[in-house]
Image: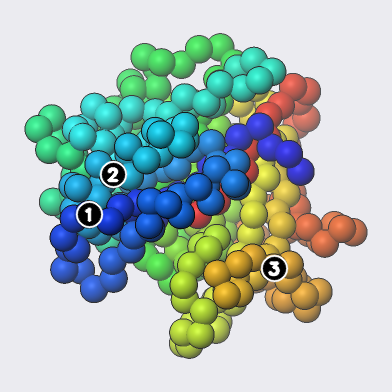
Amino acid sequence: MQPDARIINLETSITRRGTFVPKGINYRMSPENAVCLVSADIDCCVLSNNHILDWGHAGLFDTLEILERLRIESAGAGINIDQASAPAVLDLSGGGRILVLSVALKTSGVPATWAASSERPGVHLLTDLSDASVARIAKRVGRLRRAGDAIILSIHWGPNWGFDIPEEHSRFAHELIDKAGVSIVHGHSSHHPIGMEVYRNRLILYGCGDFLNDYEGIGGYEEFLHGLTLMYFASVDLTSGNLLGLEMVPLQIRRFQLVHTSSEDTDLLLEMLDQECRKFSTRISRKPDGTLALSWPHAGAERHIESALQE
């Protein structure tokens, strides 16, 4: 699969500077190792999460500078609220664009003091999931949107473990689709994949799960199939913004690398995801090549783009 755009939630700073924030777990990547993002052909990193300021403002500034140097777009954090709330704009070779906005909630562990303001660097932190929050996002989208644009709203919300999806998350996702024209709600924070919904032919990923982490060997979360993950390939119609298809590649995190899952582990992941998706009238099936596919009552369309979305 060769997607038109690859988008990830980068839940770390890229820096050697700064003083670590006393919050228990602090992540950072050595700047010389950031070329791994280029090797993976990453087009956009969303940064509104609970680790991007683990090394203070200096760590954030270094991250923004390095991503710009590597020609990787970013969204969700910045030197002020204007930069943090601005969407990344990804131009597509066949015409059209993807606008990527990134927001976070305090429920994901983002400290309130990390919120960007007109005079303070930080993340695009929402204080609530109210109609006013939807209206602000819709206004931002409306100022920049052109015909042929697909809108992705990436949101860091909720706890690390568990399958429960709060009603307010569903309502907010629906409102983003209804009032802001969002094509994909890209949810993350959960360390494992959770339920998926297709609402009015638009994709809602409530929690993608981790793609790469350093939790191997930590016990206590076996019920969540900890260590099994997915690579998501979403196809979207550029004319309508509707979902055409979602395929997922099952993978396992092993020694800081990704390997293909065994047939047994693929079946376990399939069973878990299908059970969680039924509440939204979506289903997961296994294709002959071992990938997973989402199905839902939908109508077809023609012209489309493909985006790879990862935690």
Amino acid carrying mark 2 in the image: Asp
* Label 1 with label 2: CB-CB less than 8 Å: yes
82 relative to 221, above or below? above
- The location of residue 252, given as percent across then percent down, is 65, 70
- In the rendered image, residue 228, in percent from the top left (x then y), is placed at 62, 71
- Check whether the beta carbons of the residues at disc 2 and disc 3 lie within 8 A of each other: no
At x 66%, y 20%, the residue is 93
Residue ID at (78%, 23%): 302
Q: Secondary structure at mark 2?
A: helix
**Residue that badge 1 annotates:** 17
Q: Nearer the viewer, residue 185 or 55?
A: 55
- Asked if disc 3 and disc 1 are in contact, CB closer than 8 Å, the reply is no
Residue 254 shown left or right of residue 111 in the figure: right
Give the amino acid at mark 3: Val
Report helix, strand or loop for mark 1.
loop
Direction left: furthest residue: 119
Identify residue for label 3. Answer: 259
In the rendered structure, which amino acid carries the disc numbered 1? Arg
Between marks 3 and 1 in the image, the one whose residue lies nearer the viewer: 1
Q: Nearer the viewer, residue 37 or 167?
A: 37
Question: Crowdedness of circle 2 by 10 Å Cα count: few (<14), some, many (20+)?
Answer: some
- Choose the circle earlier in sequence order: 1 or 2: 1
Closer to the observer: label 2 or label 3?
A: 2
In the structure shown, which secondary structural element does the residue marked by tag 3 occupy?
strand
Which residue in the structure is indicated by mark 2? 62
Q: How many marks?
A: 3
Measure the C-alpha gap from mark 3 to mark 1. 33 Å
Residue at the far top: name it.
147
Q: Could you classify mark 1 by the number of other residues whose Cα lies within 10 Å: few (under 14), some (14-19), or many (20 or more)?
A: some
